[in-house]
Structures are given as C-alpha cells and as structure tokens.
C-alpha cells in the first residue's frame, strides 16, 4: 500500500495522508542551521550540533508519536485545525505534504480555507523560513484567528531533558514588535540567541508555555487557542515558547501571505547587548528578518535553493531502463548522501541528537557517497576527522560537531576506524585529483604541536592494523569492528554495563580488549582498502613504501585463506577464547555477511574459487525476499562471549536483521564478480523506491534508506527502522554508480566496468569529472552482464576500459559491452 507518490519532475515525494505508518520526515538546511520536519510539521531545529545547540524542543518516543514542531493553529468559528492535521487532528478536507530537496510544503484545507505552508532553510542562512499562504476558497467572508507555536529548547538538549530543578528557573525571552527572542542564559555565558518572527503586526502573543497550552492540555488543545484569545504572556523562569496571534479576515477568493522566520544568531562577546546592557544586540536578527520578509524574497530564496540542487544533482545523473533506479540515483539517494554527510548519525527520528556526534567510521564512509557533490566540504571533513586521530593510528570513535574534539566518553580502540579514512581520502583524491590534501598538516588529538601530513595519518592508519595482529596473524577485533554489537572483549554479565565502552574491566589487564579475539572482517577490509594506499604511495614515487604495504596486504590475504576461510565462506572472527565465530561448526551465527564482500573484492582465494563459494553461500543462507540478513542462524540466546549482538531478538538489528549498509558490500562484490543480475536483485530488494508499494509493512519513508529491515526470524519480517542516517546511503550510491553501472573514478581517470542485468539494452551516465562533462553511453547488444568489447572516446577508439582525465569541455564515451 502507498501513502503518496513520487513526483520526479519536481523531485518531490508527495504524501497524501497525514497518517503515514510512521512520521515521514525531511531535512532542511545544509551547513549551519538544520531542521527535521515531519509530514505533519513535527520535528525540531538546531545549529550545527543537535546536542549542544538545540533551538527547539522535541520529545522523543512520545505518545502520541511526533508531538512538538512548528505549528500553526487556525481557528475558524469553533473549529481549530492545523494545515498538517496534527496536533489538533481535526479532519481536513484536503491534505498534502511535498517533501523536496531542502524544502517541505504542507497544504491543508478545511471549510473553504486553504493553508499552504512552505518550509525551507535558505542557502547560507541560519534560519527556517515558513511561508503561509492562507486563502479563502469559499463563498463567504472568513474571520480567522491564527496562532503560531514553537517551543524553545534550553540549548543543551541533554540538560534540557534531565535537569529540571534548574531549567524551570532559567527561561528568558525578549519581545520587539512581532519578534520573540529566546535568550535563556544569554545574559551569562552564552553569546547566541534565537528568534521567531512574522512579517506583519501581531494582535497578541504568548511566550509562556503554561499560559498558552495549559498544564493539563496538550499540543492538540492549547487553552489559549480554544479560548480564541492570546494570553500575552511573558515567560519568566518557566518554559519559554514563541507564539504569534493574528486576526485575519478574508473575503471570498482573497489570499494573504505571512512569513514566519525561526532564526539563530551569535554575537561577539563584547557586542552582546544594546546600550542598556540588558537587551540583546539584534543587528543580526534584523538583517536576517529583512532578508526574507516579502513573498518575492522568499520566492528568490526558494529559487536559489532549487538552483543549488540542480547543480548538485547535475553532477552525476543516469538514464537506465528502470525508472526506479533513475529516481534513486538522480534524486533521493544523492539527497540522502548529503544528509548523512551533514549529520552523520546524530539527529533523526531514531537518533536523539544527544548520544552521537560525528562518527569516525560513519563520516568517513559518508564521504564515499558525497564527495562528488561538494569536494571542498569533504576535504574539510577529512581534516576534521583526521584531527581526532591518535598518533598510533587509533582514533576517537566520535567527535562533537560544535567543538570538533574527540569524545572521550566513548574513546577509541575500534579496530576498523582507521581503515575507513584511507578509503575516504583515496575517494576524495580519485574524484578531485587534489593530491595536495596529502601534504596538509593535520594534528593528532587536536593538538597543533603534533601535526603531521595527512599522508602520515594514512600511514599510521594502515599500520595500526599491521601492528595489532592476534595469534593467527589476523587483526585484533579490539572493542568492536564495524559491527558495534560484536563485543568480543566485553563478557558483560550485569545489566546496564556498556557493551562498547570500558565500564566493564574484564580485559583491563590486557589494556582494555582481548589480545586473542581477531576480526576476519577487518582483515578483508584491510585487503580491500590497502590497494588504494599502495596506489597513493606509488603515485608519490614512494616505491619502497608501496612495496612494503603490498607485502602486508599479500600476507594478510594468505592469512585469511589459511585461518579465515571456512570452506564455503569466510569466517567472521575468533572470539576471546580463540573459538571460531561465523563458522559451520558454530551452533548459531554460522555465517556472517560482513567479511564476504570485501574478501571477494580483494580476490582472496579467487584462484581456488573462494569468491564464488562465498557469494553463493551468502545467497543460500542469507538471502530473503526483503534483502540479505546479517547472520544466520540468528542467535536465539545470549552468548556472553559475543556481546550485544545476541541481545537483540532474532531478526532485529545486528542479530540477523537485514542491515542494508552491508547488503551494499555484497551488491558491489556480486557486480565485481560479474554477476550483474544478482547484484541488481540485491540492489532492488532494499532500494526504497522499489519498496514503495509495501509502505504499510516497511513503515519508514519510501524515499530514503533505513539502517535496518527486520529479517526473516523477526515477528515483523520486512518492517523498516532507523531511516535516514545510515552508511547505507553512501554505500548504495557507490554500489549502483560505481559497481553496477561501473563508472569508477580512479587516480588517473575513469574506469568503465559495468556489471548489469543481462536484460538491459544499455544505459547512459552523465558525470562531471575534474572539470569536464562526460557522457558515457553504454550499449549491451549481446545481453551480457560484464565486459567491455570496445570503447570510443571523443570519436576515437581506445584500447581497454580506462578513460584518462580529458580536461574541460564535453566528452562522449561510447561503450559497447561484449
Ligand atoms: C546499535 C548499533 C550502533 C551502536 C552505536 C548499537 O546499540 O545496535 O547499530 O552502531 O549501538 O553505539
Ligand atoms: C550503526 C553505526 O552507526 C555504525 O557505525 C555501525 O557500523 C553499524 N551500526 C553496525 O553496528
């Protein structure tokens, strides 16, 4: 069942009922100011850091769900309704929500009144613009009362939802004309404020939540709205909000437009106040308000936003025989890559914005799907990430976006973290040809005195693996590898103990983690990533170092074949007792997905057919109608030696859920092995646009990937969760564009190596690359999956399938498969 439809010409998903199976959200903002907005206008806003600079409040896991947002209440006689249906839930005559690229338009109609609200964060602007067009489509004059509402958060989102003994005595606001300023703690140690304004004189206001809503009422029945009269309340200590009140009369056919702005500004510490020493210096707010206070300015802001997305999505675009592929690649997958790049795993409807900042492994992987869009931002991110690395190559697992400092509560010692940085820096160079990043001085642990070149950071990353091998010569698993839930050093036997941090001293004597537990997944990741490192060294003429690195890679491959291959597939790990994990000899969890794809793409054991055996085993044991499960059989009980993974009921999350992130590694590997039909089968099982018809089962948004779909062992097989912020976005972009369609940026050009469904006649990819516009036309007359028979570059036949950097201008590459 569907709850809307794709409008590809406008790059929108159009939701036609407010009662979606879960709130279906969008993200507004690209750099400083961010909003989460659901299809009923729920959600919240923050500046850069969802934890440390939360602007509006949101209560997660609420009952009913998704309460709190930016709401407009329209009181028409005794009827009160919202354009987005919630929170009043008055039945509407018409409802529609259009989620587009960086904007959302929600339209509601009731009793002849139409309210269309456009929400967006203009490019380079630290505020959310909300334009309401209110129209009388009936035949009688309408006298309407309009109330707006946002609820301020007290900046630190963690403190805001815990420290009530203090918070209930801190709230402060200031009023000026139609603008309500939020200045809690501004007098003291903060230099930032927020404001909510409307571009018209107001007939009243409220800034105190208890006055506006009433202690025993809710968002759906605020007492002031029910009474039809604002309280003109000034918050003092208690929970500050911002609400404007306007009386509006509309003749039949008449419309009016009101523009609300929810903004954020910072002042230099010595310029915080006006001359009275008390009032906020509002110069910045005034300029921001002035920028969008007319419909013309709003239209221009929206046009600029559209133009920016035209540009961003014009960098890579495809025409394949399947519209759903085009829709994913040309619109939604790339859009999601921008969002994951911006927010890592910090703020979604499943990530509270409090627990996690920018993840080291997550953000490095996000770059793979984003780097072509804004390479300069990717570069800056790479340097920020590398600045949280430690001199031995280990890394802080996360950093806060506002401080850019490694988070010591979480710490480091995740065995996979450093490797992802080699991959992302290589991807950056392959895309841009900007080798200068390697010379950039980058500190360790944010200490400028320790700075070394980015290249040296890659060196310590690579050797962090080589220098931390276990008894079989495989990489130590440490606290965890990519799978945070395989905690081989934890042995947790008490509720509340962290599986992932060192609150549990079982391996204290060994330095925190087991020196026996080893990860085959990290071994395979090492051999997959290693060649990029070698390629970098060779390019720099460091042949001896390249040779040494290659020897380490070759040795690792041999070790994996010796100790990490189970006969039909690659093992997952050795646990801290030295026992195999992910082996046919295990009672449960006999096979895991994670090592298989990287091992295949590293050609480990290819000469003895290990690659095809591994892929066939994945198909045989992990494939289901909704995607590939992570492991099989699911764990049915707690295995203390494995940790968190076995705490999930079978079929959920890392315990045999369909973890879409690692499905992509198999899609890549199948494509790599030339099995384009299998690659495409797996791709289409999890690609959201292919699952739109089962939205009632899938529940999460049909336009973006979620982290997980419940696996076959779950009671709710096929149900999606954790939408938006997942490495799935970047990896599926890589899988479809670089592995299936096979347009691969390389250090010295583009490699064209499609691996497609045999039924396809061909496809076209247009791609900007190093200043040139490339059109790659692939035809498949023999209906095969892989193999390039001939290639013509700008009219001239060339040998092989590599296109050198051709420079500026338009270039046509004609490829015939065969
Ligand atoms: C989740 C993982 C996640 C980790 C983050 C676990 O509970 O299952 O998916 O990566 O927490 O710390
Ligand atoms: C989600 C986390 O964000 C990611 O870092 C991790 O690799 C996966 N879960 C698997 O545990």
Image (cartoon, rainbow, N blue to C red):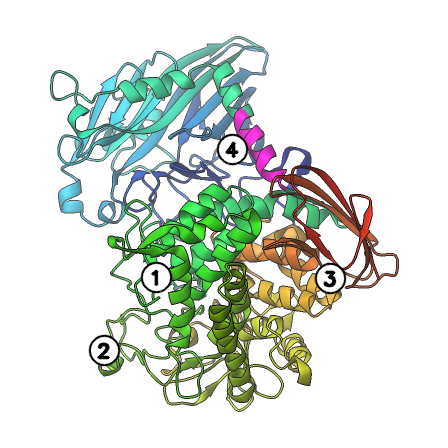
Give the mark nearer the N terminus: 2 vs 1: 1
Q: Compared to 568, does 242 lie above or below?
A: above
The reply, left or right, for residue 69 in relation to residue 445 is: right
Describe the element under mark 1 as helix, strand or loop. loop
In space, the residues marked 4 and 2 are separated at their CA atoms by 48 Å
In space, the residues marked 2 and 1 are separated at their CA atoms by 19 Å
Which one is in front in this view, the residue at disc 2 or the one at disc 1? Answer: 1
Give the mark nearer the N terminus: 4 vs 2: 4
Q: Which mark is residue 549?
A: none
* Residue drawn at x 39%, y 42% as measured from the top left: 67
Q: Is residue 46 magenta?
A: no
Q: Is residue 409 visible?
A: yes
Residue 717's spot in the image, x, y percent? Answer: 57, 66
Give the mark nearer the N terminus: 3 vs 4: 4
Give the mark nearer the N terminus: 3 vs 1: 1
Give the dominant element type of the magenta stretch: helix, strand or loop: helix
Given contact means CB atoms under 8 Å apart, are the residues at marks 2 and 1 in contact?
Answer: no
* Residue drawn at x 23%, y 27% as measured from the top left: 267
Q: Compared to 63, does 93 lie above or below?
A: above
Residue corresponding to mark 4:
103
Describe the element under mark 4 as helix, strand or loop. strand
Given contact means CB atoms under 8 Å apart, are the residues at marks 4 and 2 in contact?
Answer: no
In space, the residues marked 4 and 1 are separated at their CA atoms by 32 Å
Residue corresponding to mark 1:
397
Q: Quadrant of the C terminus?
A: bottom right
Give the mark nearer the N terminus: 4 vs 1: 4
Residue corresponding to mark 2:
505
Which one is in front in this view, the residue at disc 3 or the one at disc 2? Answer: 3
Q: Compared to 538, does 429 lie above or below?
A: above
């Amino acid at each position: 069942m569907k709850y809307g439809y794709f409008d590809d010409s406008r790059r929108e998903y159009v939701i036609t009922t407010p009662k979606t199976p879960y709130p279906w959200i969008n993200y507004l903002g690209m750099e400083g100011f961010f909003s989460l907005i659901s299809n009923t206008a729920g959600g919240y806003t923050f500046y850069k850091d969802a934890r440390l600079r939360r602007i509006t409040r949101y209560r997660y896991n609420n009952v009913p769900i998704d309460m709190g947002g930016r709401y407009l209440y329209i009181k028409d006689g005794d009827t009160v309704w919202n354009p987005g249906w919630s929170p009043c839930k008055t039945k509407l005559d018409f409802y529609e929500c259009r989620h587009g690229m960086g904007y959302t338009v929600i339209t509601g109609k009731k009793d002849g009144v139409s309210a269309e609200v456009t929400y967006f964060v203009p490019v380079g602007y630290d505020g959310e613009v909300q334009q309401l067009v209110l129209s009388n489509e009936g035949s009688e004059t309408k006298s309407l009362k309009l109330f707006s509402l946002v609820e301020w958060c007290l900046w630190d989102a963690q403190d805001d939802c815990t420290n009530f003994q203090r918070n209930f005595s801190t709230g402060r606001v200031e009023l000026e004309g139609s603008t309500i300023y939020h200045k809690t703690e501004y007098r003291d140690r903060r230099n930032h404020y927020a404001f909510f304004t409307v571009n018209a004189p107001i007939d009243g206001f409220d800034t105190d939540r208890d006055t506006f809503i009433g202690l025993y009422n809710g968002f759906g029945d605020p007492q002031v709205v029910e009474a039809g009269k604002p309280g003109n309340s000034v918050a003092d200590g208690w929970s500050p909000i911002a609400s404007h009140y306007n009386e509006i009369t509309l003749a039949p056919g008449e419309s009016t437009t009101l523009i609300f702005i929810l903004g954020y500004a910072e002042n230099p510490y010595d310029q915080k106040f006006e001359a009275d020493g008390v009032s906020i210096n509002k110069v910045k707010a005034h300029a921001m308000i002035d920028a969008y206070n007319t419909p013309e300015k709003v239209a221009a802001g929206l046009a600029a936003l559209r133009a920016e997305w035209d540009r961003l999505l014009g960098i890579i675009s495809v025409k394949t025989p399947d519209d759903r592929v085009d829709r994913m690649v040309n619109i939604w997958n790339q859009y999601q890559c921008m969002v994951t790049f911006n927010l890592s795993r910090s703020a979604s409807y499943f990530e509270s914005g409090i627990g996690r900042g920018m993840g080291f492994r997550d953000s490095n992987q996000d770059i793979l799907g984003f780097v072509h869009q804004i390479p300069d931002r990717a570069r800056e991110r790479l340097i920020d990430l590398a600045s949280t690395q430690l001199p031995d190559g280990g890394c802080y697992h996360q950093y806060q976006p506002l401080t850019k400092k490694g988070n010591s509560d979480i710490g480091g010692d995740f065995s996979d973290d450093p490797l992802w940085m080699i991959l992302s820096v290589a991807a950056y160079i392959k895309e841009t040809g900007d080798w200068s990043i390697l010379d950039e001085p980058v500190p360790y642990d944010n200490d400028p005195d320790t700075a070394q070149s980015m290249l040296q950071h890659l060196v310590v990353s690579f050797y962090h693996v080589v220098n931390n091998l276990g008894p079989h010569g495989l990489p130590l698993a440490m606290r965890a590898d990519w799978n945070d839930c395989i905690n081989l050093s934890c042995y947790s036997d008490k509720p509340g103990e962290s599986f992932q941090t060192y609150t549990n001293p079982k391996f204290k004597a060994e330095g925190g983690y087991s020196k026996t537990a080893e990860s085959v997944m990290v071994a395979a990741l090492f051999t997959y990533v290693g060649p990029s490192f070698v390629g970098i060294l060779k390019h720099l003429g460091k042949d001896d170092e390249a040779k040494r690195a290659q020897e380490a890679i070759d040795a690792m491959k041999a070790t994996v074949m010796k100790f990490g291959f189970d006969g039909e597939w690659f093992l997952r790990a050795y646990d801290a007792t030295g026992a195999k994990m992910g082996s046919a000899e295990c009672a449960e969890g006999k096979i895991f997905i994670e090592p298989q794809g990287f091992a295949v793409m590293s050609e480990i054991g290819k000469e003895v057919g290990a690659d095809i055996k591994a892929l066939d085993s994945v198909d045989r044991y992990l494939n289901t109608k909704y995607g590939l499960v992570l492991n099989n059989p699911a764990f049915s009980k707690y295995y203390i030696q494995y940790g968190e993974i076995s705490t999930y009921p079978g079929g959920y999350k890392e315990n045999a859920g369909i973890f879409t992130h690692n499905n992509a590694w198999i899609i890549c590997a199948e494509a790599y092995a030339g099995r384009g039909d299998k690659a495409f089968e797996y791709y289409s099982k999890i690609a959201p646009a292919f699952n739109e018809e089962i939205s009632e089962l899938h529940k999460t948004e049909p336009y973006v990937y979620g982290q997980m779909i419940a696996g076959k062992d779950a009671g709710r097989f096929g149900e999606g969760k954790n939408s938006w912020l997942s490495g799935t976005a970047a990896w599926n972009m890589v899988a479809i564009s670089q592995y299936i369609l096979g347009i691969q940026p390389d250090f010295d050009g583009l490699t064209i190596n499609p691996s497609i469904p045999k039924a396809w006649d061909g496809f076209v990819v247009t791609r900007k690359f190093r200043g040139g516009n490339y059109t790659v036309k692939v035809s498949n007359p023999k209906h095969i999956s892989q193999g390039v028979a001939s290639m013509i570059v700008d009219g001239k036949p060339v040998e092989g399938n590599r296109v050198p950097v051709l420079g500026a201008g338009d270039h046509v590459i004609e490829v015939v498969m065969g």
